[in-house]
Amino acid sequence: MREMIFKFNVVEQRNVQDLKAALINIADSLILNGLPPPYEIMKKYKTQLLLDPKHAGELEVRALWVAYLEFVVISALMDNVGVTDEIYIEGIEKRRRLLYTSDTSNWIGRLEEVLKVARKLLDRNGTLIVASPDIAAKPFPPKFRLEGVISNISVVPNQGPLAIDNVEGELYASFKLAHLEGLRSSCVIEQEDEYPKKFPGRQQLQYFRDKLNEIIT
């Protein structure tokens, strides 16, 4: 699977080949240093990995595990750590999670579902990264759509259709939502001409990290 990660659909592959090599090197190092294999992650989190928990068969889809490896590499880069063992994975599970679906529709059309999953899995200010085959995915939802969905799902039961639970609404608003394909597009594909200007290795990884930090934490 490590050979399938970070496929950047750029104009000229040579512009990002050093970045991809550096990211694969990180993946190799994380695997050697105790990254739990897919069956252990699946055993621990089961359908919490899925946007559609009734579709348990998706746990065996290779695309999920390719996405999960990318997610861990991104997390390691953002947290500047060299070990992503079981202790690390448990340590980030309330602040950053991956959610997979094989649904090819626009992920932003499912914001309510995504937010409700985030509410169950994450602490305040947590980040949920969606992975799906939506190749044209935006990296994050527009503010106006997010605010509209949050307003609808923060209605207080039995208090009238216009009564809003402000505390609940603020919690939903604290979550950061992103799409893995959208991150690839925004942080690499749209920036492909910038990477050759950076020295391979640390400088390119830092630039990638900076672009990620503009969207997620």
Image (cartoon, rainbow, N blue to C red):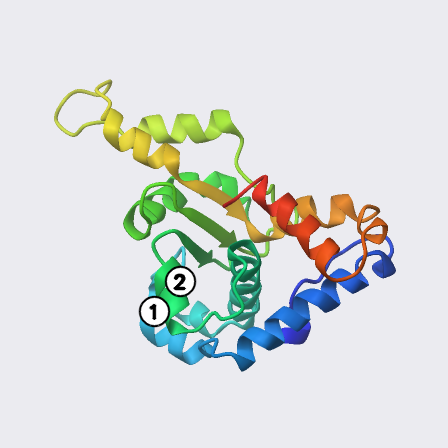
The vertical placement of 37 against 143, above or below, is below
Alpha carbons under labels 1 and 2: distance apart = 6 Å
The residue that disc 2 covers is 49
Q: Position of residue 39 (x, y in %)?
A: 42, 80
What is the three-letter code of the residue carrying label 1? Lys
At 41% from the left and 66% from the top, the residue drawn is 88
Report the residue that reaches farthest toward the left: 158
Q: Position of residue 61 (x, y in %)?
A: 51, 71
Q: Does the residue at mark 1 contact the one at mark 2 (Cβ under 8 Å)?
A: yes
The vertical placement of 129 against 43, above or below, is above
- Quick check: 160 left or right of 112? left
What is the three-letter code of the residue carrying label 2? Leu
Q: Position of residue 22 (x, y in %)?
A: 71, 66
The residue that disc 1 covers is 46
Say which mark, if any, is on residue 25: none
- Residue 1 in sight from this viewpoint: no
At 48% from the left and 39% from the top, the residue drawn is 109
The vertical placement of 211 against 74, above or below, is above
